[in-house]
Amino acid sequence: MAGPEDGVAGTVEAVRFDRVTKRFGGHTVLDGLDLAVGRGERVTLIGPSGSGKTTILRLLMTLERVTEGVIHVAGEPYSHMPSGHGARGAGAGPGGPDPKAGLVPASERYLAARRRGIGMVFQHFNLFPHMSVLENVVEAPVHVLREGKEAAEARARELLGMVGLADKVDARPTRLSGGQQQRVAIARALAMRPEILLLDEVTSALDPELVAEVLDVLRDVARATDITLLCVTHEMGFARDVSDRILMFDRGRIVESGRADELLDEPTHERTRAFLRAVR
Ligand code: ADP
């Protein structure tokens, strides 16, 4: 199967939304959205509550399906698959999917394989309470990626060290602070070796004094890896530090986008100005 490395290396986008519309009943949440995120790019989505930011991340996690339009990940269809995919096998031939071939909504099986390259950290940490911190991080690499237990544990310890929790590997999540639990959730997401990491308001369930430790860990992750990041956050300092680009959303559309410092310091759109005044 043709991977992103084939062809024009480095130019394949990590994520592309082509005219994506998402409706819930009669309510249009995303309205013909075009969005491209480069490999290794860090993009933050900002905007008022209800503007569709989380829906974008949930579509990428396949927790929702598009109503119209197509999502591509790493240059290949993601929300859809080439028609005849099942009959002809993955990628539909040696050259990968034929761009002229019709696309049909992706099957569960197609999605299950493709979403492994995407990790997500949620507002609520969703750790397994009956497992130790180490077991939480090791679970998916062993059961989904079929990594050997020893290798998975070694990597989990390394990741837990990176998020500052080397001394908590044997603890139960319920014994940890919210900030510590969220750092476990970050290690757990990274253990799946995602190429794309989605961060959905990862500090908004935390007590204010615990926010900094989580954001510091994420800054380290951003510095230490070339992972593609898509964040939804109300922490503008964090957005400034980690983002190459910020997209301002309003009612399911991008009203303004630009380099992080430019958009935050000199917003051109009145909606952006009003939003930034409200969150600062
Ligand atoms: P944001 O992240 O910008 O706050 P969301 O993407 O969470 O916005 O939500 C956008 C809109 O979609 C909201 O009005 C929300 O109520 C609606 N919405 C999200 N998920 C569902 C759902 N499963 N069913 C119905 N409406 C939904």
Image (tube, helix red, strand yellow):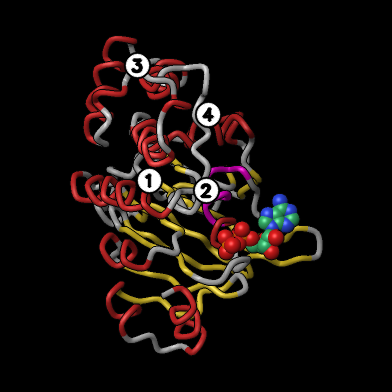
Please provide percent x and percent y for residue 187. 34, 33
Work out whether residue 12 or residue 8 is closer to the camera in this orientation and state it. 12
Amino acid bearing label 4: Gly
Q: Which residue is mark 1?
A: 196
The residue pinned by badge 2 equals 60
Near mark 2 (Cα within 10 A), the count class, few <14, some 14-19 or many ≥20, is: many
Vertical position of residue 113 compared to residue 247: above or below:
above
Q: Which residue is mark 4?
A: 89
User: Upstream in the sequence, badge 3 or badge 2?
Assistant: 2
Q: Count how many numbered circles sit on residues in the image.
A: 4
- Front label number (3 vs 2): 3
Asked if labels 2 and 3 touch by Cβ distance under 8 angstroms, the answer is: no
* Residue in the foreground of this view, choosing between 132 and 56: 132
Q: Earlier in the sequence, mark 4 or mark 3?
A: 4
Question: Mark 4 or 1, which is nearer the eye?
Answer: 1
| Ligand 1 rendered quadrant | bottom right
State yes or no: discs 2 and 4 in contact (Cβ < 8 Å).
no
Residue 131, given in percent of the width and then of the height, sits at: 47, 17
What mark, if any, has residue 157 been given in the picture? none
Which residue is drawn at the image coordinates 65% and 46% (left, top)?
A: 104
Q: Helix, strand, or loop for circle 2?
A: helix
Question: How far separated are the C-alphas under marks 1 and 2?
Answer: 10 Å
Q: Are marks 1 and 2 in contact (CB under 8 Å)?
A: yes
Pick whichever of labels 4 and 1 is earlier in the sequence: 4
Contact between labelled residues 3 and 4, with CB atoms less than 8 Å apart: no
Give left or right: position of 11 versus 188: left
Which residue is pictured at 25% across the width and 53% down the height? 10
Q: Amino acid at mark 2?
A: Leu
